[in-house]
Image (spheres, rainbow, N blue to C red):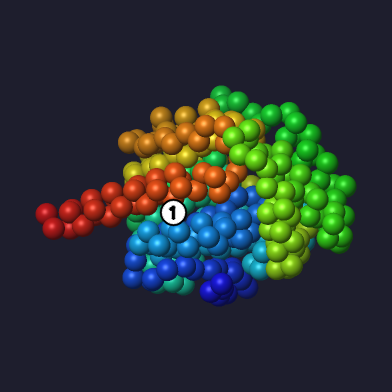
């Protein structure tokens, strides 16, 4: 790992990179309650092997980045969107392709509107702009997360079991569930976390509504990738994003849930490389006109 700490105004963000810095940059933003390690190292390397400089980082309250007391997040979604730009600044990157999953996809939309000059393309995985008419998460998912209060965050076995159960309930029917891999990632998450219980703060963060209401104003090429069996952000959300963002493309992952399963990596990585390559070619052509 090439971890580094980016610091400003008392905030620390832990970031990691893959590939050559002169290549077009892809910034990966993970979802709620998950640090950057859920962007698997092999997934990142394969993107980098496609001629990209890949950066992943820990959002606030997960991993090795700044944490706040559980129940008291001292920041907004706007702050989290700005954190991503601070990461680009630290790597001296003027413009990047932004790839966001779940909550990270929400932040990606905000960045495209709040900092459009920094964005080349966006890729939105398993996410939404949460328009009020879209279907809610499945009731079994609501029930699962409502029981988070019984987790003993000081006990490794309890934390690892929660992570495994969470991954299992979010998975689709297409792939076999990888319990051993999920458990290994959960143990790694716990080992490198400043305060594992602080991950619950992501459910309490506010803001972003004014940006998500303007998704149709996004002016950069967008690729929407969504599993057809996503139980927390139903597939209809992905369809809606692809319809509302001008000129966007939709890649449906049949039978996939709210997950980035390695069985889907080939198609996802190929789609991201193609999406970002087309944008780079367009940019170069425009510069010569």
Against 132, residue 74 (above or below) is: below
Against 197, residue 140 (above or below) is: above
Q: Alpha-carbon neighbours of circle 1 within 10 Å: few (<14), some, or many (≥20)?
A: many
- Residue 208 in which image quadrant: top right
Against 203, residue 58 (above or below) is: below
The mark total stands at: 1
Q: Nearer the viewer, residue 89 or 169?
A: 169
Residue at screen point 51% across, 44% down: 264
Question: Is residue 278 in view?
Answer: yes
Measured as percent of width and height from the top left, residue 248 is found at: 36, 37
Residue at screen point 51% across, 57% down: 43
Residue at screen point 74% across, 50% down: 163
Residue at screen point 53% across, 60% down: 42
Quadrant of the rendering where the C terminus is positioned: bottom left
Measured as percent of width and height from the top left, residue 19 is found at: 42, 68
Q: Residue furthest left?
A: 289
Q: Nearer the viewer, residue 145 or 158?
A: 158
Quadrant of the rendering where the N terminus is positioned: bottom right
Label 1 SS? strand
Question: Is residue 68 in view?
Answer: no
Say which residue label 1 marks.
Answer: 98
- Residue 67 in which image quadrant: bottom right
Measured as percent of width and height from the top left, residue 40 is found at: 57, 58
């Amino acid at each position: 790992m090439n971890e580094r700490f980016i610091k400003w105004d008392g905030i620390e963000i832990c970031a990691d990179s893959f590939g050559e810095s002169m290549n077009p940059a892809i910034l990966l933003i993970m979802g709620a309650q998950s640090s950057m390690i859920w962007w698997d190292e092999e997934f990142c390397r394969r993107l980098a092997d496609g001629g990209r400089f890949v950066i992943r980082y820990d959002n606030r309250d997960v991993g090795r980045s700044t944490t706040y007391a559980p129940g008291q997040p001292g920041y907004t979604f706007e702050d989290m969107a700005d954190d991503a730009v601070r990461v680009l600044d630290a790597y001296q990157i003027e413009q990047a392709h932004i790839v966001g999953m779940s909550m990270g996809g929400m932040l990606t939309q905000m960045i495209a509107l709040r900092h459009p000059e920094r964005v080349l393309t966006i890729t939105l995985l398993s996410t939404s702009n949460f328009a009020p008419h879209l279907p809610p998460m499945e009731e079994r998912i609501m029930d699962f997360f409502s029981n988070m209060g019984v987790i003993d965050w000081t006990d490794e076995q309890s934390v690892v079991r929660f992570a495994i159960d969470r991954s299992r309930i979010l998975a689709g029917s297409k792939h076999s569930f990888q319990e051993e891999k999920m458990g290994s990632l959960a143990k790694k998450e716990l080992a490198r976390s400043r305060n594992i219980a602080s991950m619950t703060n992501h459910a309490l963060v506010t803001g972003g509504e004014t940006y998500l209401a303007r998704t149709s104003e996004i002016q950069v090429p967008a690729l929407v990738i969504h599993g057809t069996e996503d139980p927390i952000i139903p597939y209809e959300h992905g369809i809606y994003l692809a319809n509302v963002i001008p000129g966007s493309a939709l890649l449906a992952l049949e039978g996939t849930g709210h997950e980035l399963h390695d069985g889907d990596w080939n198609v996802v990585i190929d789609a991201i490389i193609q999406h970002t390559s087309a944008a780079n070619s367009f940019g170069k052509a425009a510069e010569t006109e």
